[in-house]
Image (spheres, rainbow, N blue to C red):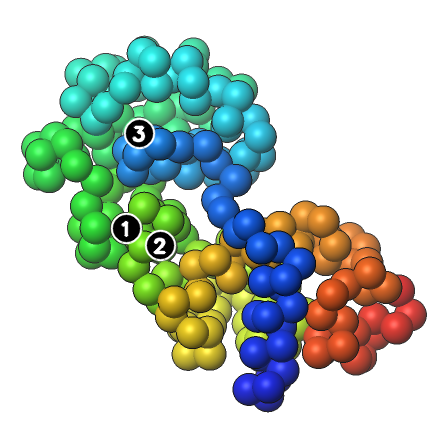
Amino acid sequence: MRTREQIDAIIDGLERAYPMAACTLDYNEAWQLLVSVRLAAQCTDERVNMVVPALFERYPNAEAMALAAPEDVEPYIRSCGFYHGKARDIVGAARLLVTEYGGVVPDTMEALLKLPGVGRKSANLILGDVYRIPGCVVVDTHCIRLSNRMGLVDDLKDPPKIETALRAILPPEKSNDFCHRLVLHGRAVCTARAPQCGVCPIAGVCLHYESAGRQS
């Protein structure tokens, strides 16, 4: 694990390197983010952003989507992969939103987790990005990889355990943006196959660099 000083240096270093931390999924409202994050499972954000304009033109809100059948939605999202399950979840979520929440995406973890296709990662993203609730930690593949490499968590692979560990050390008001910065850093520098420690802005406080990064 890193010391408090090292953790703060990692947070500050990523803030300087990626000042414009933001979700890379395009959306204008909570409903659109809810749909897009489901489509993004095992699919790139870039592909999702290409697909959703036509989807949202046809189904602009939960009420419209709730009237659809999953097979009606499938042609719009086919290129995102796993489109049968994704269409089923999106329509199911829309119907529950209409019947239980007046068509509005809820702002609590408990309510979000009741929606088909929504897990803690998606719920934290919505709570942090849309509702700006402090303390949200989005544990995706980049977060799992980088938090372990940096030494922010102690060899953890289970997302709920990583979420709990990061909540304990990240300032609540910075946690959501920090997770976005991990995504940006994981794509640009700390990649899965070959971390580029030589150009990493936080190498000096990174556990991986201390133990093996100097050979990269």
Q: Secondary structure at mark 1?
A: loop
Which residue is pictured at 21% across the width and 40% down the height?
105
Q: Nearer the viewer, mark 3 or mark 1?
A: 1
Question: Depth check: 80 or 204 in front?
Answer: 204
**Residue position for label 3:** 90
The part of the image, by quadrant, that contains residue 115 is top left
- Examine the rendering and report whether any part of residue 161 can be seen: no
Amino acid type shown at disc 1: Tyr
Q: Position of residue 22 (x, y in %)?
A: 49, 47
- The kind of secondary structure element at disc 2 is helix
Q: Is 173 displayed left or right of 114 in the figure?
A: right
User: What's the CA distance linking mark 1 and mark 2?
Assistant: 6 Å
Query: Residue shown at 48%/44% (left/top)?
Result: 23
> Which image quarter holds the C terminus?
bottom right
- Left or right relative to 123: residue 203: right
Q: Amino acid at mark 3?
A: Ile
Q: Which picture quadrant has residue 205?
A: bottom right
Residue at the limit of the structure toward the right, as seen here: 215
Q: CA distance from mark 3 to mark 2?
A: 21 Å
Q: Amino acid at mark 2?
A: Gly
Q: What mark, if any, has residue 131 been given in the picture?
A: 1
- Residue 185 placement, left or right of 33: right
Q: Are marks 1 and 2 in contact (CB under 8 Å)?
A: yes
Q: Which mark is first along the chain, 2 or 3? A: 3
Crowding at dot 3, Cα within 10 Å, few <14 / some 14-19 / many 20+, comes out as many
Q: Residue at x 19, y 46 (%)?
A: 106
Q: Which of the pair 71/100 is nearer the observer?
A: 100
Query: What element does badge 3 sit on?
Result: helix
- Which residue is disc 2 drawn over? 128
Q: Position of residue 167 (x, y in %)?
A: 41, 73
> Where does residue 18 sit, x and y in percent of width and height?
62, 55
Packing grade of label 1 (10 A; few <14, some 14-19, many >=20) is some
